[in-house]
Image (cartoon, helix red, strand yellow):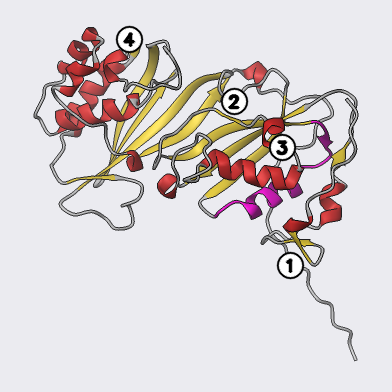
Amino acid sequence: MSCATPALPPSLFTNGSLSSPQNVSMNSLNNLVKVSDSGGFKWRLVIAYDGTKFAGWQYQESPPTIQSMLEKALIHITKLERKELHLVGAGRTDAGVHAWGQVAHFVTPYNYTSLDSIHAALNGLLPKDIRVREMSAALPEFHARFSASSKIYRYQIYNDTFMDPFQRHWAFHCAYKLNASKMQEAAKLFVGKHDFSAFANATREDGMPDPLKTISRFDIIQMGSLLQLEVEGSGFLYRQVRNMVALLIQIGKEALDSDIVPMILETKDRRELAKYTTLPAPPHGLCLVSIKYKEDHLKLPLDCPVTSFGRHHTITRCKLPFY
């Protein structure tokens, strides 16, 4: 495939410099583009975001979503159309859910010789509650969603008489004294391969997803008043994690015994869970921590630019002449 070197849109620049804190020049970004006849190039992003003000990951024009904000920035930088970028995220987090290790990929018809400036420009255009932590080249077979081998989610509960105001956006407040040992005992009963239909909310987006999922670990970590519930699995159904947490909270209150977990799993019926807890745990306590991938899909392509982890600012010292 051959293509002309794309010019970056003038709307991004003020007096020849990118209108962002990174102050990357137009010429320097255009010089990083390497035209090739070999076809498209795939790029992997690792993204962190505070989901408080966003309507989840999945694209929609209004209200804003994480995907729509990323696409807007990428369209400005690459000057490609949305349908040409093919931006795909690994996990479609709900409104209010956060991420430290969300992964996405997109494609361009041209290669880059360096990623540091593109990375800096991308973060300069994104709102402050979304940051690209890492940018790298990816093999054609890499897929942010389908190459994943497991995902790790963490749910935070602030368990005290009053809420720590500094935790209010990232932890659910529970004023009931929770028995962490009972919760850990019950959490272990989720481990293994099960049909999680009873813990999934209905969704129109995925049709009929496979309800068989494997949970490899489910840990309850107590750090003073903060309880962290960390679960790793091959995949999760819609709102599965928040529904599991909601049941564990009831067990932590000692309103239910841990043997309720296998009993509800066996029914494969969401209505059975609703008898004991009607709503999922609130979204703001949940964070997508990281995603693990098949090793062969994480290999870098030949002759690709070095992975960008961002760069530190430096100060150029002024040398004054001696008189």
Q: Mark 1 is on which residue type?
A: Ile
Q: Which residue is mark 3?
A: 81
x and y percentages locating residue 34 in the rendered image: 88, 37
Query: Quarter-wise, where is residue 113 in the image?
Result: top right
Residue 210 placement: quadrant:
top left
**Which residue in the protein does label 1 denote?**
315
Please tell me whether mark 2 sits on a helix, a strand or a loop.
loop
- The reply to whether residue 309 is in sight is no
Q: Nearer the viewer, residue 124 or 288?
A: 124
Q: CA distance from mark 4 to mark 2?
A: 24 Å
Q: Amino acid at mark 3?
A: Glu
Determine which residue is flagged by label 4. Answer: 195
Please identify the quadrant where the C terminus is shown: bottom right
Residue for badge 2: 144
**Mark 3 or 4, nearer chain start:** 3
Q: Is residue 301 above or below residue 34?
A: above
Residue appearing at x 38%, y 20% in the figure: 237
Residue 293 within the segment the image draws in magenta: no
Q: Mark 1 or 4 closer to N-term? A: 4
Looking at the image, tell me whether mark 4 or mark 2 is earlier in sequence order: 2
Q: Residues within 10 Å of mark 2 (few under 14, many from 20)?
A: many
Q: Residue furthest bottom?
A: 323
| SS under mark 1 | loop
Q: Is residue 94 left or right of residue 304?
A: left
